[in-house]
Image (cartoon, rainbow, N blue to C red):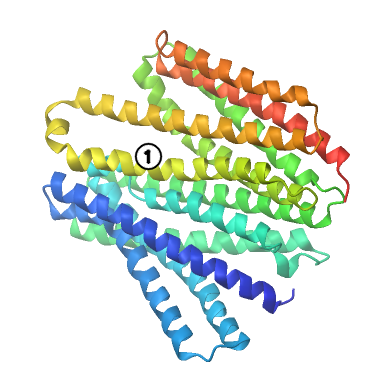
Amino acid sequence: MFYDERIENVKGKISRNAIFMSFVISLMLGIIHLANIIRNSHGNKHFWFVSLEIAICVSTLIVLAIGFIISKLSVKDERADLIKNAFYNKASSILIKLILGVFAFVMPIALYIGKSYNFADQGFGGIIFVLLFIVGVYVVFSFRRNDIYFNYSIMDSEHYYKNVFKNIGKLSLYALAFLGIAIISFLGLLIVKSLSSTIILKIILEILVYFFVSFIELSLLYLLYSFLEKCSYDCENSISKSTIISLLITIFIYAVYTACVIFIDSLPISQTSATQLVSILSNFDIYIKMTLLIFLTYFGYEYQRLHKNKLLNAGCTTILLSEALSIFIGQILSSLIFVFMPEIISQDAYIINQLFSFANVFIGDALALANMVGFVLIIFALVKDKLINKAHRLVIGAFAIFVGVELFLRTQIDTLQVNIYHFIVEIIVLCYFSTLVACIAKRTKK
């Protein structure tokens, strides 16, 4: 392992920006969620649901204030910048542990309160997923843009993967520590509240399953990212095999997810029950988004090392932003419905279901359109650099036909079947794109 001042300096600047982004996002969602509670909740206990946003806002604001003071009191030179950026690196690590600790402490309380009020329907801890997508994508993209690696200190090690698994072992210890915090919090809740054995068992199982699944997800994501970094570092082609593999992983997960949805749709149950079962598989969607975003980040970076093409940058950025912002916009829209239309919500459940359905369809259509535009821009960039035939530009017509058919099917069949069609089309598009990337990798050498 080794220490590089230049890399640590760049990481410090990225950490500072990530902390600022976390503060802004948490402040926006916190204000909306707080207004939601004030308008719709009839008890102080529901303020627990906004505690995570408050903790993030307060802690990030303190870190930013300390960083500002350090920059003002220090003499302007390289040593002062190094000290300031080293502070942001340590602060970001502490902030992650602090936020997850608060989440673990409040989680049993949130599970006890349940989803009896409108605000609770937003789901406790949604801010974690928002930050994972938006801030996480920014960090990965910034690392690639500055040509640095997250695992740079072990990149040249003879036992690279051994060190990676050691880091996963450390992650397991942190997971156990946060689980311990959750259990202690739950024991405190049992002292204050009298709960039935059924509720106790239910909450304990939910806590254990959540932490186990979260640990597996994060470990797999870190293992995948470490593999991609190593392959990109050692690659001989401008497009590394790691980039192609990440896209193939995206297609595989998407195919498994689609197969599960098709199987559920074939079951002799109502559409409502089928939709609820599909929602349980939402973790697949998280993996799909993360692997796709990692692929686009690596593909855009590696391609631009030899071909400076603004069209490709615009295409990758369009898809990255649309995917990263989709969950954030969804949180905003659904929360605003609760804030500004509480009377309609309390009187007519059908109307609120229609509003949510419209909001989800609108977000989904906007996301699909943005992704289509992004892929079209990438294809035009490849044609411009003469890496693929001009005939590939006709894919615009195929995309338009796919969208038109989907719009027509919405007036003919139920939502779940339309989603199945949408999933299959996206798999076809990704398979087509993986073929293009593989061809480009063969034709472009360093």
Q: Which residue is drawn at 43% across and 58% down?
A: 179
**Along the viewing direction, whichever of 202 and 375 lies nearer the viewer:** 375
Q: Quadrant of residue 357?
A: top left
Crowd band around label 1 with a 10 angstrom C-alpha radius: few (<14), some (14–19), many (20+): some
- Relative side of 326 to 427, left or right: left
Q: Considering only vertical position in the picture, is 349 above or below 224? A: above
In the displayed image of the protein, which residue is found farthest to the top? 412
Q: Position of residue 11 (x, y in %)?
A: 60, 69
- Residue 147, located in which quarter of the rendered image? bottom right
The residue located at (21%, 55%) in the rendering is 47
* x and y percentages locating residue 412 in the rendered image: 41, 7
- Residue drawn at (30%, 30%) of the image: 356
Q: Please tell me which residue lies in front, 233 or 14.
A: 14
Residue in the picture at 82% in, 33% down = 439
Q: Quadrant of the N terminus?
A: bottom right
On screen, residue 361 above or below 179: above
Q: Which of 260 and 140 is in front in this view?
A: 140
Does 344 sit left or right of 431 as displayed? left
Any part of residue 115 in sight = no
Residue to which mark 1 is pinned: 330
331 over 256 or under it: above or below = below
Label 1 SS: helix
